[in-house]
Amino acid sequence: MHREMKIGVLGGGQLGAMLIRSAIDFGVEIYILDKDPHAPASHYCTGFVLGDPMSYNDVIDFGTDMDAITIEKEAVDTKALKELQKRGVSIYPSPDTIEIIQNKFIQKKFLQNNNIPVVPAIATWGVADIIANKHRLPACLKLCTQGYDGRGVMIIRDERDALTAFEEPSLLEDLVDIKHELSVIVCRNEKGDIECYDPVMMIVNKERHVLDFQLCPAQINRAISLQAREIAINVAESFNLVGIVAVELFVTANDEVLVNEIAPRPHNSGHHTIEACATSQFEQLLRIIMGLPLGDARHIAASVMINILEPCSDTKSDIKGALRHILCFNGVYVHWYGKHKGKKGRKMGHITITENNIENALSKAANIRHILTNIYERSESRNNNG
Ligand code: ADP
C-alpha cells in the first residue's frame, strides 16, 4: 500500500519494535537510529543505523533520506529535527513540542500557560535552593531533564532529606496526596480529528516510584474519567499536536485531577491497546503519519498489563521458564523484548491479560504476578547468598 514510504524512528527500544509490528500490516518501511547495536527494534526493522539520537550530525545523516521521522523517546536532538523539517521531512510530533516536553520545568510552564491543571512547583538548583524554600517541604524533587522510570525523582520530607538533593536544575513540586494515577492517550491528526483511549489506572510501587501494574478501564467514577479525558484532549490541542500523546494524571485525595507529565509518543501505558483495543496506539501513530483516518480507540476487552522487570542479571532463564506456566492461561499475551543485557529493574518484557470484565482480569493477573514475584524473590535470595 505505502511500500515507498520510509519512516525513521529515533530510538530502537521496545516501543520502536512494537511500532514495526503495525508497520508490517501497512507495508511501510521502518528505519531505526540507536546507539545500541542490539536495541530491541534493531532485529526487525528494514534498516538499522548505529548512531546517537542526541547527536546533531547522526540525526541529520539518518533523517535526510526519510519521508517522515517519529520518536520513541524524548532524548533526541531537536535542532537537527528542525533542520530536517526545513528540508521537507515530516516530523511527528513537531520538534517544538519535543523541545517543550524535554525539560520538566518548561513543560509545566507551557501547560500552566494553557490553563491545564498541574501540580504547583518552583525551579531549584541544589541543596541551598531547597533549604531557602524549606517552607514548601515536604515536596517531590525531580530532575528537569534526563529522568525516567522513577530515576531522577525523590521525596524531600525535611531539611535533612534536602541535603541529599540533586545538584542539578530540578523542579520542587508540592507533594500530592495521590488517590489514583491515571494515563490517557490521545491521538490527533493533521486535520485536528481526535481519538481518545479510556483512562488507564497505574499502580505504582511507592518505594521505587516505578509501575507495578496497570489496568484499563480504570476503576474510577464516570465524572473523573470524563474530566481526565477532557484534560488530555486539551493538552493535545494546546500543542496543536499531530501525533499521539500520553498524559499522566494524578487524582488527588480531594478528587482534583492534575497533570503529572506528558509524553508525545507511544507509551508504556498504552501497551494494552495492542490486544485490548480496536486499534493499537502504534497503528494510530502510523495512520497519522500516513495521512490515513484515525482508528477506533474503544476497548474491546478489560485488561491488566504487567511489566516484566529484571531483578538481577542471571534470571532470564527463570523468567523464560515461568512464561511457559503463564501461557497456560487464556487471554494472556507475552511480549518479550529480547534485550541483550539485563540489569536490575530494567523492563525485559510485558504481559497483557484480557478478560470480559476488570474483576476477572485482576484475579487472573494476581495469579500471574504471584508467579513472577516468586522468581524475583528466588533470584534476590540467590544473589544475596552467592
Ligand atoms: P518519571 O518520569 O520517572 O516516571 P514521574 O514524574 O512520573 O517520573 O514520577 C514517578 C512517580 O513518583 C509517580 O508515578 C508518582 O508515584 C510519584 N510522584 C511524582 N510526582 C509526585 C508528587 N508531586 N507528589 C507525590 N508523588 C509524586
Image (cartoon, rainbow, N blue to C red):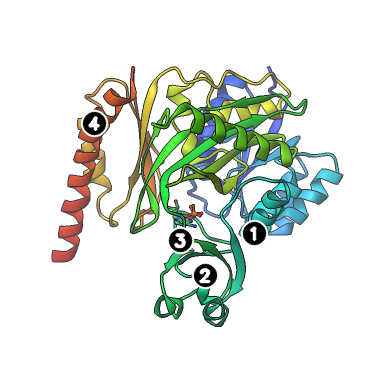
State the CA–CA distance, disc 2 to disc 4: 46 Å
Q: Which numbered disc flags the more N-terminal residue, 2 or 4?
A: 2
Q: Which mark is residue 362?
A: none
Is residue 152 found left or right of 194 in the rendered image? Answer: left
Which residue position is annotated with label 1? 103
Callout 4 amino acid? Ile
Q: Nearer the viewer, mark 3 or mark 4?
A: 3
Callout 1 amino acid? Asn
Q: Is residue 47 visible?
A: yes
Which residue position is annotated with label 3? 151
Q: Quadrant of the N terminus?
A: top right
Is residue 103 found left or right of 374 in the rendered image? Answer: right
Is residue 323 found left or right of 242 in the rendered image? Answer: left
Instruction: Name the residue at 81% across, 44% down.
Output: 85
Q: Nearer the viewer, mark 1 or mark 2?
A: 2
Q: In the structure shown, which secondary structural element does the residue marked by tag 1 occupy?
A: loop
In percent of width and height, residue 68 lies at 73, 36
Q: Which mark is residue 136?
A: 2
State the CA–CA distance, disc 2 to disc 3: 22 Å
Name the foreground residue: 23 vs 279: 279
Which residue position is annotated with label 4? 326
Instruction: Determine the residue located farthest toward the bottom in the rendered image.
Output: 128
Q: Which numbered disc flags the more N-terminal residue, 1 or 2?
A: 1
Callout 2 amino acid? Arg
Q: Are marks 3 and 1 in contact (CB under 8 Å)?
A: no
Q: Which numbered disc flags the more N-terminal residue, 2 or 3?
A: 2
Is residue 299 found left or right of 4 in the rendered image? Answer: left
Callout 3 amino acid? Arg
State the CA–CA distance, disc 1 to disc 2: 22 Å
Q: Residues within 10 Å of mark 1 (few under 14, many from 20)?
A: some
Q: In the structure shown, which secondary structural element does the residue marked by tag 2 occupy?
A: helix
